[in-house]
Amino acid sequence: MDSLWGWDPTPGIVSVWSEGDGRVDVWRRVNGALVHEQVTFRPWLLLDRIDGIRGRITTRELAGEGALRFIVRADDMATLTATVLQAAPRWLGHPVGHLRDLGDSVLVLAPEEQYLVASGRTYFRDLEFDELRRLQVDLETTGLDPQHDRIFMIAVRDPDGRVEILEHEDEAVLLRDLVANIQAADPDIIENHNLHGFDLPFLDRRAKLCGVPLALGRVGPPGLRQRGARRGMLRGNDATRRIRFVAPGRELIDTLDAVLRHDFASRDLPSHGLKAVARHFGISGPDRELVRRDQISDVYRDDPERVRRYARADVEEVAALSRILSGATFALARIAPRRYERLADAGPATGVLDPLLVRAYLRAGEALPAHAPGDGTQHDGAALHLFAAGVAKRVVKADVASLYPSLMREYKISSSRDRLGVLLALVDRLVQERLAAKAAAKTLPHGPARFAQEAISAAMKLVVNSAYGYLGAGGLTRFSDIHAANEVTRRGRETLELMCRELAARGVTLLEADTDGVYFSVPNTWTPDDERRVVGEVAALLPPLVQLELEGRYAAMLSHEPKNYALLTYDGALVLRGVAFRSSRAEPFGEAFLRTAIARLFAGDVAGVRAAYLDAVLALRRRTLPTYDVASRVRLTKSSAQYHATRATRQELACEALLASGRTTWPSGEHVRVYRTHRGGARALGDDEDPRDYDIEHYVRVLRDNFANRLARAFTPDDYAAVFADPDQLELFAKSLDDVTPILTQR
């Protein structure tokens, strides 16, 4: 297993950096002290041929049948790249300007990842998370445009927990103070929420405009470097390229990545903003200062102490949030040969599994397969059943922990291209680690220790579940095997059908079933012990490595569509799942109505459901709702230049809204809030605007058709029409709501 998990026992690595010049800087924490080492290293890459390679280059052929069978090394990356590009025209028949132009003929990693793969080293061996030196930083700015707005305050929380508020009228002095502060604290990690989406791009631009060298790294010349990333700042107007900034020698961690990873697995967060997440995890104090972003600069002029309290709370909450949720990335960094900050935003398949597979094959001296197209076989989908829709009481969820990976382990299903069996070995170990973390979390009280174990479990779940997707990804992954993926889904359908059949035979009412588990309603006479007994009986019928367990108990469930439902916990919390109930594009007023109406529905208060609807209609018609509450958050898919090129044949609401608001240029990928006006057009909403000129009747229709409709399956058609009748359309014989009750309909 050393080839899977790294074989070099060097402890305490907290950062690695290489410029590709044959040297690698390594920083380690040893008994709390920072040790800096510089080692020599020969950069390498893999090729499928070496004819024409000349110069100060060494080559070695690997064993096996893989196409990428030649390791090519040089004293530095520049020499290696130039030599390969010089030989490449003989292979391709035309000159190339970059290694990526070689396509599947080459595998090249970032220099520091080359070093980690070749050396068998990983981050954080023998370290606990709390031994890392973490610093949190948060900017307060006069606006969102770094070209015209400025930084007027910076909150810094040092690794020992002390918070300092940096302020100065001269922005250049303020930026130099920040640099000095970070250099003095010498953190291993710099953190903030949306660090890569806002703070670092803003800071980098302002430093350039102010002429301040941004020396935040530990080595090299001042200034931040750039790297490609899945999420981050757009590279110019290119919607296909995103970048993140790098400070060599330190890891730049955005807690938004951890929040997104957590919510992908748990789907329990109300939103992804810092304040909402801090409240969700109980780390936001009762006297937490809150200031709207568009008002911060104005509030600072009148009450600077209030903004200082606000900024202090931001960095304190980021520190606590990172401690709770970064356990996932921390655990991955102990395994995968990538920098900690890169694993924070890496996809689980190509970002985590691929480096592990590459390292294992090279350690064994085996050639790697190149990406290969499929043979035309179609990918079979997973089973998905909606047995009943409407409102159910006394609901139980029975879940197979990582069903597809468990089936891969049980029936030894893996890629036929994986000659060493590495993928299955990885899945086996990661499932064990995930189950151990999940079990540990259940023994701990609500708090940071439990959240850390849940974060590890969530990370392992993402990675092991991605193994199935990795198999079925066609030519996108080098070990893909559509036939193996189809065998997994076939076994999954069999297993799910067995579970549903046996549960139904024991007297439950099936509600919904998919690869995440089965929801069912139990008789009123059952006790929690009865629920556990039935799940245990069905679990005993499954293969040994397929572990069914009681995942959750709920007082009620509103089933709308497959994978779209609302749950009421026994302690009164409301959980919304699926895009029908939670969407980043949804208008805030509609989501607020849904939460109120569903809570009343679960309480059996049908009159309260109607009252919530009438209140929302009245607020719209009187325009007491702020414009923000009717605006939808939209991501622009075209830059202004791209849109103008196609506008004559196809118009898009969001872009037209920007033009109507006076904006003529924008980048692709920007998020804006847009709404329909009473004049029939659309406008983009600025941070400090509230014109209240929205189209009332349009949003009344949105309320009825897009939001109230989510409750349609809870009533008969006649009852639904009565509950959501328009208040301005009086009916001669209006139906009384006294006899209306929620229903559950078998499908």
Image (tube, grey):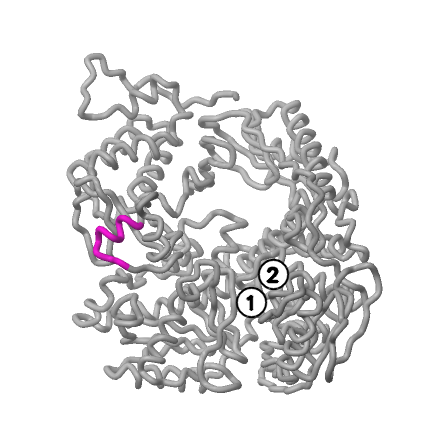
Q: Nearer the viewer, residue 99 or 322?
A: 99
Q: Which mark is residue 23?
A: none
- Quadrant containing the N terminus in the rendered view: bottom right
Q: Residues within 10 Å of mark 2 (few under 14, many from 20)?
A: some
Prevailing secondary structure of the magenta residues = helix
- Mark 1 and mark 2 lie on one chain; the one further toward the N terminus is 1
**Relative to 690, 426 lies left or right:** right
* Residue appearing at x 56%, y 25% in the figure: 509
Picture quadrant of residue 15: bottom right
Q: Residue 704, position in %: x, y? A: 30, 31
Residue 296 belongs to the span the image colors magenta = no
Residue identified by numbered label 1: 342
Measuring from the top left, give residue 542's x and y in whole percent.
73, 36
View extreme (front): residue: 93
Residue at horizontal 56 percent and vertical 75 percent from the top: 131
Residue 29 visible at all? no
Question: In the rendered structure, which amino acid carries the disc numbered 2?
Answer: Gly
Taking the view exactly as shown, the residue that stands out farthest to the top is 733
Between the C-alphas of marks 1 and 2, the distance is 8 Å
Residue beneath label 2, please? 351
Write down the region rendered in magenta.
655-664
Residue depicted at 77% across the width and 64% down the height: 361
Q: Are marks 1 and 2 in contact (CB under 8 Å)?
A: yes
Q: Amino acid at mark 1?
A: Arg
